Amino acid sequence: MTLLETVHSPAVVKKMSVQELNTLAEEIRQGILKRDSLIGGHVGPNLGFVEATLALHYVFNSPVDKIVFDVSHQCYAHKMITGRQNGFLNPNDYEKISGFTNPHESEHDHFAIGHTSTAVSLASGLAKARDLKGEKYNVIAVVGDGSLSGGEALEGLDFAGSELGTNFIVVINDNQMSIAENHGGLYNNLKLLRETNGQAETNFFKALGYDYLYVNDGNDVEKLIAAFQSVKDADKPVVVHLNTLKGKGYKLAETYKEPWHWSVPFDVTSGEKTVDFGGGESLDDLTYNYLQDKIKKGEKVAVVVAGTPGVFGFNEQRRQEMGAHYIDVGIAEEHAVAMSSALAKGGCRPVFFVHSSFLQRTYDQLSQDLALNKNPAVILVYWSGISGGDATHLGCFDMALAANIPNITFLTPVTKEEYMAMLDWAMTQKDGPVMMRVPNAVVHGDSVQPKADEIKTMAWAHKGEKVALLAVGEMLGLAQKVADKLKALQVDASVLTVRCVSEFDEATLEALKANHKVVVTLEGGVITGGFGEKIARYFGSSELKVLNYGLKREFTDRVPVDEIYRENRLVPQLIAEDALKLL
Amino acid sequence: MTLLETVHSPAVVKKMSVQELNTLAEEIRQGILKRDSLIGGHVGPNLGFVEATLALHYVFNSPVDKIVFDVSHQCYAHKMITGRQNGFLNPNDYEKISGFTNPHESEHDHFAIGHTSTAVSLASGLAKARDLKGEKYNVIAVVGDGSLSGGEALEGLDFAGSELGTNFIVVINDNQMSIAENHGGLYNNLKLLRETNGQAETNFFKALGYDYLYVNDGNDVEKLIAAFQSVKDADKPVVVHLNTLKGKGYKLAETYKEPWHWSVPFDVTSGEKTVDFGGGESLDDLTYNYLQDKIKKGEKVAVVVAGTPGVFGFNEQRRQEMGAHYIDVGIAEEHAVAMSSALAKGGCRPVFFVHSSFLQRTYDQLSQDLALNKNPAVILVYWSGISGGDATHLGCFDMALAANIPNITFLTPVTKEEYMAMLDWAMTQKDGPVMMRVPNAVVHGDSVQPKADEIKTMAWAHKGEKVALLAVGEMLGLAQKVADKLKALQVDASVLTVRCVSEFDEATLEALKANHKVVVTLEGGVITGGFGEKIARYFGSSELKVLNYGLKREFTDRVPVDEIYRENRLVPQLIAEDALKLL
């Protein structure tokens, strides 16, 4: 029996010797690597925070003392010593344990969190609740250096530094990396603090009112225990700044920090990925080549990302090739959008690349800084649509979020040809901001590229009668299957692709009235506030019946995609039957 | 002719002597007071920034050099010396000039901005565009101390401190106040810097990578000119920290800074308000008394605001009475929502009070930190609905923004009785977050208070037939007028109030099918993504026809409310006729 198998609760850890803790750390690392290598997950952040996790649980008394993990990238070790080691050691249990903290799994987890920059704010709320209730315990926020640049983290740090006045411990896991390299002045200060062993007078955290403690050996469990013991029960806010090694204990992850921040399944010995993405043509390549071509021609293109360049295929070589035209603002989506608005105002053509779920982090800037000012920035939204992922990373909310904001043109291409034509149009038009869902796969259409005046129209994939299937982006495939089912039921349904969800193509919608009785909308997004409801409104006073299909208003959590389709009645036969009933 | 009347452009200012500049400052102050006293506006922030504005225009060459004002509260003097003095001197021209910067008014304004914390991000985009285009000019961000606590400002400051590396000047207008007093550790650092004449080693701005210059006499035009000249054409980012006097030159505003931040029309000599709000019963009082009663009983209520307590009637006395239960996080809405989620998790019952338009500043925290975690925080939304205000402060987007997020219950009471019953229910239920539009006026209903199981239902105001009018909140009055018109046309229409826009009251909706042919929805919000479209979806496959009325997807800018109603066909006779056509 390994040591790890004996740890049924953090209480066991508290009784261990330093030597045992180090052995346990090694076993935990093997567990992290085993799970990540088999099903993928966060590698580097978790490997670097093993000793600190053990020291936290050795010193503090969870769950009475409350440890709040930011974005949870560093929480695997915590999960393993709070009764969930089987979720790492036993492949049959992998699906039971998520990659993020989750209160449904354990009383040691206080929030379900997958977006970054949250821990300080959340922990300060727990601390304030404790104070209002007259209770006594430690509240600890664990936040990675990369997460510090986000607005929520900065707001929280500013508040908690002066307004609590009671016990509040912020542990900075400084592994000198965001997902990619860090960007922002704050990181120069962290560097200065590391280089001066925490002694530099210029200290961001002290400026915000915190006591400050630096631990240079952030992977030395004995020194970490001493550090945490010295701040335990502190009666005012204190920052404990740990210098940790990202990827610690796995040479590849120590050396190549960015590609090993998160990984798909891999072979532990060689580091080779064990899944095949098929290769071939990719929209990442097409998009990069298109933009880089413009940059080479001297066009004032600005490529903006917020800390996640890998999502868009911007590897180090491409970043270098784009030079000053490539701007990584760090994890700071609000700033990314506001800055993009101003870049457009200043005569450049910015393209902000963003993960659908992280688009949520910047609603007000989309509305006020950008849309109200009608500056022609381009926003490319990745990983949109129906996904079987974690509840914290769903790509189904972007249309309801952004397409209802005035002045934003929201496009939903389906084929490669449509996408490239739309991108080219977006890069040259001057009317205002254009947002576009980048298709998740290359789909070759037999359609010709839409011309500029066709960008906002619906396109006929098939002209039939009685039933019109309106498919938003990726749903074209489903629409065609529904059409097949209807064909078998003697109905020759029309199929149309919806290229723009923020505006009506009135000419086409009116034309439908001539020989259709039922309009069916299909969208890979939440149905409330989405495109289908707009069509229901449009035809609400007409003779046409409307059926809307999309996702229920809910956070699905690691539900397989086919199950999501079934649960939302996105099933060709059922949709065909629904439509038939209305004829 | 006054000096101010001769200033047709900033070029005139550049030729003035210090004595003339001081005279001009005095004339500008009179202009500010005249306009504010007649139509209301921002008083203190503008009075305090007159000399700095003159010095900026004296030293820099606008619009080639670009001055970007944060939230624009300090921009009146700037407007007056960029050809828009008549908007202050001539009451007939007041409506032509807004209270915020506006590119449609002048080439000296670069953005339409009314939300706070924006200047640094926006200005950094202009600076980056300048660099990419190989141009040379100064970019200056002007930001008040109160705005610094917002996430967008902090993200922007962090980015620009290290990532630009070229000319970028941040002017901090430190008048030692947000709208109310400041909250956050940053403000202790500003205080320390003021007390040490800028010499303290602990320096927030230096920690982010800025050069730093302190000007203690922030209302001394000569010293300001010298300071700005010393940073003009600087080749790296620099912060110029000005210690200014909020309300300068108007004794009342100097003494009572919070009530004179912004004012309705007033008598300049006495300071008395010249508009009568009618007094009488107010929901502010009712809400405060309800919460304070709970606090006195020992309930763990936490009242959270983000820098704008006055909007909710929380004057200094009330803030003191609530004691530790009152939490002003400063201008930091993201933190306010995340912290509220954690306060609920920690066993308190938080109530976050927020201006409808500022709710936009925290979408991701509503979704991830709060709704995903289903913590029972309460959010009270003020100044919602149809307004004739500035494009930057519209209250019509809140329902489309928040009611489409899973797990959020969004309530829209109309009468005082409904509101109080809903508030009480929200404060005791445990299912998850509840958001509620606080009515803008006290409406007495003849309806009884809804019981707990009636909170999410629709209420019958009148049972008729053929046409059902579904009114969201404030629109009940309009619905009743439509019913009157229909009555005259021989139709006895039903009238129902919609208490909850995030969920369907299916029983009532199904009941409508029995004896109605047309359902009309009326909402004081943007129609895209709103409640009406959900009803259109609900009845899309039925025999019932649906007509949706609400606001077009647009930013209206100072359009009178009656005109907004007309332009959106919110006219009883027209709606009645539309419905009649479908019978």
Image (cartoon, coloured by chain):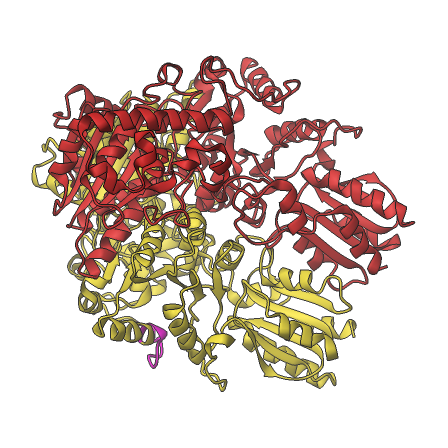
Chain colours: A red, B yellow
Magenta span: predominant SS is loop
Q: Position of residue B23 (x, y in %)?
A: 21, 46
Magenta stretch containing residue B276, yes or no? yes
Can the viewer see residue A48 in this picture? Answer: yes
Residue positioned most to the front: A1
**Number of marks in the image?**
0
Residue A361 lies in what quarter of the image? top left
Residue positioned most to the right: A490
Q: Residue at x 64, y 66 (%)?
A: B569
Front residue (pair B221, A307): A307
Residue A170 vertical position relative to residue A104 in the rendered view, above or below = above
Residue B211 vertical position relative to residue A510 in the rendered view, above or below = above
Can the viewer see residue A185 in this picture? Answer: no
Q: Position of residue B279 (x, y in %)?
A: 33, 79
Bounds of the magenta span? B274-285
Front residue (pair A537, A178): A178
Residue B264 vertical position relative to residue A329 in the rendered view, above or below = below
Residue B164 lies in what quarter of the image? top left
Magenta stretch containing residue B525, yes or no? no
Q: Residue at x 60, y 69 (%)?
A: B522
Report whether B7 appears left or right of B492. Answer: left
